Image: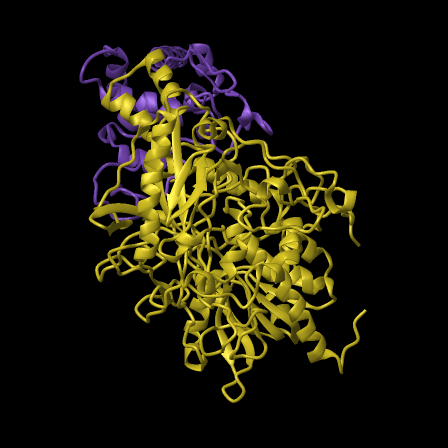
Chain colours: A purple, B yellow
Amino acid sequence: MTQETTAGTELRDFVKFSAAVTGFSEFDLWGTGQAEAYHRTAVDQVGQESLRAALASDPSAAPADPVVASIIKLWYVGVWYGPEQVGRTDVAAWTAPGRSGAKPAVAEGGRAAEDPSAPPFVVSPDAYTEGLLWRAIGAHPSGAKAPGYGSWATPPAVEDHQETEVR
Amino acid sequence: MTSYDVTDPMIFPAGAATQTSAAEAAQGEWDAVVVGGGMAGSIVAEQLGNAGYRVLILEAGPGKDLDLAEYESYLSRFYGAAVKDNQSPYPFNPNARMPRSTDTMPVRPDTPRDDFYLVQEDGYCTDTTFTRVLGGTSMHWEGKALRMLPEDFDLRTKYGQGLNWPLSYDDLEPYYRQAEAELGVSADVEEQAYLGMHFPEGYVFPMRRMPPSYLDRTVARGVDGMRVTLADDDYTLRVRTFPQARNGVPNPAYDGGKGFVPVGAVSTSQVEEGERCQGNTNCVPICPVQAKYHAGKTLTKALRRGNVKIVTQAVASKVEIDERDGRVTGITVKNYRSLDSDSYETYTVKGTVYVLCAHAIENARLMLASDMQRMSRSKLIGCNLMDHAYLLSWGLLPKPAGTMRGTSCTSGITDLRGGRFRGTQAGFGVDIHNDGWGWATGSPYTDLVELVDQQGLRGTELRRTLGNRISRQLLLAFMIDLLPERSNKVTVDDRYRDALGNLKPVVSLKIPPYTMRGAAFARKLAADIFDRLGAEDKTVYHRDRPSAVEHDGHWYNIVGGNHLAGTHIMGSDPATSVVDHTQHSWDHDNLYLVGPGSLPSIGTSNISLTMAALAFRSAGHIARHLRAAKAPVTVRG
C-alpha cells in the first residue's frame, strides 16, 4: 500500500511539474493518457534520483537542468531525447516527420556509434499522436487526428491569435 | 465461392495476394509475366487481366495481404518510428532493400556494406528514394498528378535542348484521361488549361479541385499579378491549385453527366475509409485513410478476377535470354522466406511476354545484372537517369497563415514551367508547402529544441512562441527540370551486392549548368516573393552537405525529388533509344519496359500521371502482341 501510494504521489508530482513547464494544464496532460508511460520512461532513462532532482529544480534557472528539457520535449512530441542531446537540432531534424537528408552521427539499432549518446526513441505510437506540439501550433499530428476535408482553407487560430479571412 | 461484393471495387477476397505458391508460379507458361506490383505493373496487369490473359506479378517487397490490417501496420510503424523519413512506414528488408534519404552518403571503401542501398561514389549524392513494397512508390508518393506540357514532347525541336519524344501531347491525351479516372484526380479544367495544355470539349476531371489552403491564399495576395522577365519575354505569375490523385468532391458533370464514384480504402470487408481527403498533412510517406490513390486500388481490381496472380517476396534476379534470337526465355526469381532470413528458393517463371515495371532504377539494375547491355544496340540501359532537382527556399511570414494544415501541398506557381527561356535555362514549378519548413530544416521538432534547449522557454511562453512561429512558416519548393544526360546513370558493380547476392544499383547523378541556371533564377524569385509578402528570408545553404552544388560562385543544396526516370528511354531509333513509343524493347521481341524509365524527358511534371498514361497505352499494345502470338492456339472469350 505504502509503495503504491508513493508511486502515485510521484506520478502526480511529475504531472504537476510537467504542467508548469509545458504550459498545458494537469487536466490536459492526464488527458493524453501518456502520464504513466512518460514518468516510467524518465525514471528508466535517468534514474529516480536525477528525476527527483530535476523536479525540485528551479524552472527558471540558467542553465536549466537538461532533464527538465528532456521532459518538456517528451510531452511535446513523444520522443525521449536524452539529457546529453540537449540543444541537438541535428538529432531533432532527423526525428521530425517529412525531413529528408543524412542522419546525424547518433547510434541507431546495431550500427556502431560514432557518437556515444543513446539514440532518441518514440515512447509508443500513441505518444506521437498525443504530442502537445500539434495543439500548440493550432494543427494536428501529421498523419493523425485529421481536421476534415477543406479545414485547411479556414483562417488559423493559434494561442492568443485568431486570423480573419484574407479576402 | 466468393463472399465479397463484386460491385465494390475496393473489396476483394481475403488472401488474394498470397494465393499463388512458388510451385504454381513456376509451372507452365503465363501469358504475361509482370515484374513489380507498383503503379505501372498494376495497370498493365489489370488491363491484360481484363482482356482475358493469364498474368503473373512478381513483387520483390513484402505484402502478405493487401488488407487494411497491413496498411494500418504501416501507419503504426510510422507513428512509432524515431526517424520519420519518407520510407519510415515500411519495414527494413535486407532482401529487397530500398534507398533511404538518411543513408545518403558517398560510399568509400571503408563504408560498412549494409549502411546504404543506392551506391554513390561521387561528392554529390542524391537523397532520392523509391519504395519496394507491394504498391511500390505509390504508397509514399505525394499524389500530384500534372500532365506534361505539349512543348515538353518536342523540346529539342522547339528549344534545342533535351530530346524529342516519339509521341505528342495529342497522342497521349486520351490516355491522360484514362489515367485521371484510374487515379481519381481532383482538379478544375478551367484552371489547368495553361501553357498549351488542352482538353476535349466538355471534359471535366473526376473530382473538383482540392480547396486551396489559407496559406496558399496568403501567398496569392503577394504573388498574383507579379511580373517577371525571362529571355526577353514577360510572364505574369499567379497561384494555381495542383491536380491531385486524392479523393475530393466528385464532379457531377464527369463522363457526360454520369458522375464519378471515388475508390475508397482497400479491404476484405466494408470500411468507411478512403473517401474524401481529411487533411492529414501526411500524403508522404503515407495517407492514413487511403484517400490518396495507391496502386493497391488497381491491384485489387486485377486480383479479383482470378486470372491475375501475384507472388510477393519474389525478387526478379535475372532475365534469361536466348542468345540466338534475343528472346526472353524466363525470369529467375529468388523467393525469400521472410524479412528476417536470407534463405530463399530459386525458380524460373515463363511467359509469352515479359513486362518489367520495377521503376527506373530497378528495371535498369535488373537488366544490367542480366548482362543485357551487351545485346543492346544503343548501349543506353541505365543511362539518362533523371530526377527533378529540388531547390528549397524558406521564409517567415509576418502573421500566422495556418501552416501545418491541409494536404502536403495544394497550390503553387506553374507559369514558369514553359516558355522560350528553356533554350538557355531549365523551367520549374513552385510548390507552396502546407507542411512548413520540415523538409528543409526538420521543423517543427527543430524549433522545439531551439526554444526549449537554446532559448530556455517554459510554460505558456513556450506554447505561445511555438504556435506563432510555426504557423508563419512558408516553404517554397522549386521543382526544376533536369534534362537527359548520358553520363547520369545507373550501373552495377560486382563489389556491391545485397543479402540475396543481387547487385545493388550504383548511381551517378550530376546537376548540370542548365538546371543550375534555373536554380539560380528560382533563388532570386523566392527572395522577391518573400519581399512582396513581407516575409523574412531564412534560407541557408550548406556547402558541406552531399547535396551541395556550386554555380556561378554560389552554393546551393539540390535535393532529390523521388521522380526517377529515364534509364531506358523511348525513341524512334534503336541506335539512340532502348524502347519504342509502345515501350517495346528494340532488342528483345517479347520484352516491354513499362515505367518512368521510358520517359525521354521529365519537364516540370511529377512523373506518375504520365507513367500511368503510358502504361495504359502500352497495355493495349501488349494485348495486341499477345493476340498475335497466341491467336492460332487460343480462343479467348
- Name the residue located 48 percent from the left edge and 43 percent from the top edge: B414
Answer yes or no: is residue B104 visible. Answer: yes
- Name the residue located 41 percent from the left edge and 81 percent from the top edge: B374
Which of B113 and B609 lies nearest the eye of the viewer?
A: B609
Residue B289 rendering spot, x and y as whole percentages: 59, 37
Q: Is residue B543 left or right of residue B597?
A: left
Looking at the rendered structure, the number of numbered marks drawn on it comes to 0
- Name the residue located 24 percent from the left edge and 56 percent from the top edge: B123
Q: Is residue A144 left or right of residue B395?
A: right
Which of B253 and A75 lies nearest the eye of the viewer?
A: B253
Residue B248 rendering spot, x and y as whole percentages: 64, 36
Residue B450 rendering spot, x and y as whole percentages: 27, 25
Answer yes or no: is residue A147 visible. Answer: no
Toward the bottom, the furthest residue is B324
Residue B455 rendering spot, x and y as whole percentages: 24, 20
- Which quarter shows the N terminus of chain B? bottom right
Toward the front, the furthest residue is B232
Which of B216 and A86 lies nearest the eye of the viewer?
A: B216
B273 above or below B463?
A: below
A72 above or below B352?
A: above
- Name the residue located 53 percent from the left edge and 62 percent from the top edge: B595
Toward the left, the furthest residue is A63
- Which quarter shows the C terminus of chain B? bottom right
